[in-house]
Image: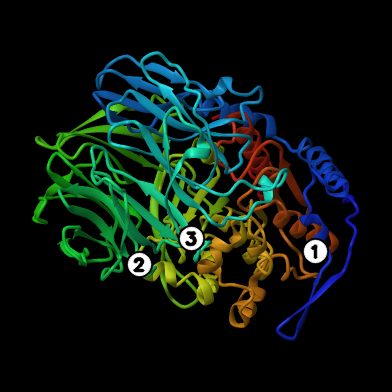
Amino acid sequence: MPDIVYPHTERVDVAEEHFGQAIIDPYRWLENSAAVDARVAAWIQAQNEITRAYLETLPGRDLLRQRMGELLDYARFTAPVKRGGRYFFTLHEGPKNQPSLYMRDSVDGENCLLMDPNSWSEDGADALGEWEASDDGRLVAFGVQTGGEDWRRIKVLEVEDGKVLDDEIRWARFTRIAWAPDGTGFFYSRFPEPEAGKAAIAGVANQAVYFHRLGTSQANDRLIYSTPDRPHLLHMADRLANGRYLHIISTPGSNEAALTVVDLGSKHWTPRTIVPDLKSEWTVFGNDGTRLILTTTYGAECRRVVSLDLAETEPQPTEIVAEAEGKAVLNDAAILGGRLLVAYLRDAKTEIRRFTLDGKEDGIVELPGIGSAGGFRGNQEEDEAFFVFTSLNAPTSIYRYDVATGTVTPWAEPLVPVDVERFVVEQRFYRSKDDTKVPIFVMRRKDVASPAPTLLYGYGGFGISQIPCYNPLQLAWVEQGGVLAVANIRGGGEYGRAWHRAGKLENKQNAFDDFIAAGEFLKQAGIALHDGLAIQGESGGGLLVGAVTNQRPELFDVALPGVGVMDMLRYEKFTGGMLWAGEFGSPAEEAHFHNLMSYSPYHTIKPGRNYPAILATTADADDRVVPAHTFKYVAALQAADLGPRPHLVRIETRAGHGAGMPLDKVIAHHADMWAFAAYWTGLKITSTR
């Protein structure tokens, strides 16, 4: 490969003092919006041109793109939601850019197309966001996502005639949609209207829950709940089908939340806060008269099932299902057919147990194999239920479950264009720096027995578990003879709150140590080639990849940080960054500042070391982790003496943090990353599969 001459990036040495330490921020001007700063727009164009020219030279790139399209050419369903005798679900048909909303009049009836987002824009970048059908199944309220942004416009569809009503809600973001019991309107969460031209950089503050009555202007919507004294709380309003109560979860961005309820059977809809503090998780999934049925971490590190009786003056949790033994983490729960169905993660694999409504054990649900299951759908009183099952080598399938008989039958089982029997998945365990035992999933072709180029994926934050899921894009790597590894590092939720706490705030280094140890394990165990290890992560995982690359550049051969949080001293300044302070700590506090400074990818690059090949990725419309994080990080990489390997950035247009990205862009994005990783790890891409 010829030497790369990077575009010139101007240094403007902005200096600030933080707790007696001078911090130089030479690329702060890259925080400006490209829409208003021509220098930033020119920088983006120059970076994309040099990256595009380099990627076009990579062998196998076109073969990967073609094969990914083939691997994704099958029908992908979501579990159906039954309302008024109708079954609503989304279906992503083969190579189409976006999934569409469908309905059936009976469980095995014909698919009826309700709306097709593929017709909403020429480039396929507008997508269906949140949606919810009314209790009687006559109406569907749905969010429109434009060009990858987090903002939503909410509209309403009449199911019978396919007419979209004139109602339109603006400035909804991080919202759910909950219909009133009588279908006259719905509840949603919105922010104040941003200043003209500043929606893309608007902060996340003063969200409130409103009720919109159909046929009226949004200006007349009724304010239901807000916390002006705590402007940085998010408020998520929801209601169970046929339920009496609206329940509102209020959170500063962490898993812990306050709980407020509104009795929709009352005249005045007065909010009543049941849990005022932010110390535990509370998730409502059932309603029995005045009793709410919830999962919670209150008194249970790995969650338990409790009830709260709203007839009491001060409702206190009454235990129904105790916290499980043996590090099994409650991950999902539902009341279906008069039974409690509870999904647990044990070493990041799912098992589903049944209980009576008073908490007595009532057997298990037999799963199709070892993998991930949940996403229960159904009604409390009906025996018909649905759930999702998937694994690294098991395509995502929808199963129908008869609660009365215990029978599990396929409802939507995809016919994928690949023989999944060619692949083997195993779970291994390794020891981290402090001797903590960490699980890791490894997938490869059955005939690959010697060390091979390996793609290691990780996240490690916000209590999010990395469960095994079928991903045709990752399969394209494994099909070529590469290995895929997914590490369940600390900071996730695989072993409950303790596992999460062990990788957040002042313990964040544990997540990095776990990921580094995963790389060492893969090489020492003869899974990865000695010079063939690529690492990938997105969002919080992009931070992970950036941090460990700085800490152990010689361990990794390729780094693929995507939409990462790279400037840990300024993340609170952008859009929703304030919501992450509970995970990372605020740089405005001295103890947190020093911790953040110790690993911030932008600030801890080590000149004079040989770095791996780096392809950072971001998108111009990302209003969650703004692209300035990646811009500044890449500018700093390119300015430093880090050895001969390329350090490039790929900047997608009309795309955001990931959700809603059209399939053709998703495929092109991953084909570029895999071709880049293949070249620098020695994986030969061929048309033979």
The residue positioned 79% from the left and 38% from the top of the image is 52
> Is 134 or 348 nearer to us in this picture?
134
Per the image, label 1 sits on a secondary structure element best described as loop
What's the amino acid at mark 2?
Pro
* Quadrant housing residue 477: top right
How many marks the image carries: the answer is 3
- The x and y percentages for residue 364 are 16, 47
Dot 3: few (<14), some (14–19), or many (≥20) neighbours within 10 Å?
A: many
Marked residue nearer the N-terminal end (1 or 2)? 2
* Badge 3 or badge 2: first in the primary sequence: 3
Q: Using residue 314 as the reference point, say whether residue 374 is left or right of it.
A: right
Q: Which residue is mark 1?
A: 642
Q: Nearer the viewer, mark 1 or mark 2?
A: 2
**Above or below, 413 relative to 344:** above
Quadrant of the frame with the N terminus: top right
Report the amino acid beneath label 3.
Answer: Leu
Can residue 274 be spotted in the picture? yes
Asked which quadrant contains residue 612, the reply is bottom right
Evaluate if marks 1 and 2 touch, with contact meaning CB atoms under 8 Å apart: no
Q: Is residue 679 left or right of residue 664?
A: right
Q: Residue at x 51, y 55 (%)?
A: 527
**Quick one: 327 or 57, which is closer to the camera?**
327
User: Label 3, on which residue?
Assistant: 233
Residue 138 percent location from the top left of the image: 33, 23
Residue 276's disc number: 2
Residue 151 in the figure: left or right of residue 435: right
- Residue 380 point in image, percent of width and height: 18, 40
- Residue name at image x 74 percent, y 86 percent: 20
Amino acid type at circle 1 is: Leu
Q: Which mark is residue 311?
A: none
